[in-house]
Amino acid sequence: MEKSNGSSEYGFILVGFSDRPKLELVLFIVNFTLYTVAVLGNSTIILVCILDSRLHTPMYFFLANLSFLDLCFSTSCIPQMLVNLWGPDKTISYAGCVVQLFSFLSVGSIECILLAVMAYDRYAAVCKPLHYLVIMHPQLCLRLVAVAWGSGLVNAIVMSPLTMTLPRCGRLRINHFLCEMPALIKMACVDARAVEMLAFTFAILIVLLPLVLILLSYGYITAAVLKIKSAAGRWKAFNTCSSHLTVVSLFYGSIIYMYMQPGNSSSQDQGKFLTLFYNLVTPMLNPLIYTLRNKEVKGALKKVLGRQQ
């Protein structure tokens, strides 16, 4: 039995790299390892930010939110991907595909905006250090996070139904590891340019606009750092922002390449690996970047681990 939009009653077939079984085995091992590290790392960051009172500051409030989003981002797709990579069954239910697409769109959008919020926080810390706690008061932090969540959910609420209801004329094979919007749009048997352009418009608002705000924040930060006379002071200011800047580069670099191209002209295999990168590698690296480059997080981690012994 088929639904009117071309999906079966059961759902879809996630093709992935099913034509290369040896590659699938390698990907299963790599993805399982990276996913385990991502879950442990981000859970640890959240736990440390909650338990250590020294980290009850705006910067670590945003960092805990970022880690929670990374957990949601990976968990929305990776477990299903691992199931499909492990054996011959490559199916995903229609409801599972809807949930996966909605989670992917909403969490990815929220993270884009949250990274811009974190850049503003770093701007306030470096450029307005004496007024930092007045500017970044708890109510403002909560409002900024609420804006990020609200914007991401609006994107998913609009784009998920439009993508899922495109006629597919019985096409069930998704040439991807997961129910990602570009792959689902490509399955349509009608002209989907209107949906693609709407997705491109949302990408400008949710990806490009926050990136512009990030670049503006770091422009002001750079100007402020150059005015610092001592090398130690410049290094301290740079160290305050370096972790966030690294995360922004990793996340935005891959996601812009994927979504800021009308018609999604990148090759299928290249798109799959880029999706893996920002859906798995980036969430795995984020806790390592913040832990290895941040003395406060390392100190809090030692304190928390010492309590458990």
Image (cartoon, rainbow, N blue to C red):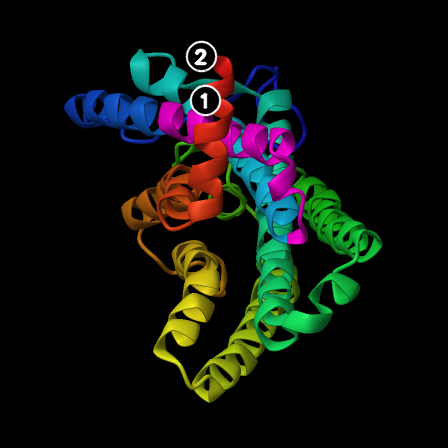
Q: Is residue 12 above or below residue 219?
A: above
Give left or right: position of 32 versus 301: left
Q: How many marks?
A: 2
Q: Quadrant of residue 100?
A: top right
Query: Is 123 situated left or right of 287 in this image?
Result: right
Q: Residue at x 46, y 43 (%)?
A: 183
- Image coordinates of residue 219 in percent, x first then y, are 51, 81
| The one of 131 and 136 positioned closer to us in this rendering | 131
Dominant SS of magenta comes to helix
Compared to residue 31, the image places residue 208 above or below, namely below
Residue 208 in the image: x percent, y percent? 57, 68
Q: Amino acid at mark 2?
A: Gln
Q: Nearer the viewer, residue 200 or 70?
A: 70
User: Can you say whether 295 is above or below 201 in the image?
Assistant: above
Residue named by callout 2: 309
Q: What secondary structure is marked by label 2?
A: loop
Q: Do the residues bearing badges 1 and 2 touch, measured as CB atoms within 8 Å? A: yes
Label 1 packing within 10 angstroms: few (<14), some (14-19), many (20+): few
Please give the name of the residue rendered at 61% of the width and 16% of the height, measured from the top-left corner: 9
Residue closest to the far right:
139
- Image quadrant occupied by the N terminus: top right
Q: Which residue is at a point 33% across and 29% down the rendered structure image?
A: 34
Residue 7 picture location, percent across and down: 58, 26
Place of residue 223 in the rendered image (x, y in percent of width and height, measured from the top left): 50, 86
Residue 172 forms part of the magenta stretch:
no
Residue 74 visible in the displayed image: no
Q: Which residues fall within the magenta stretch?
A: 35-58
Q: Is residue 56 magenta?
A: yes
- In the picture of the structure, the residue carrying the numbered disc 1 is 305
CA gap between label 1 and label 2 equals 7 Å
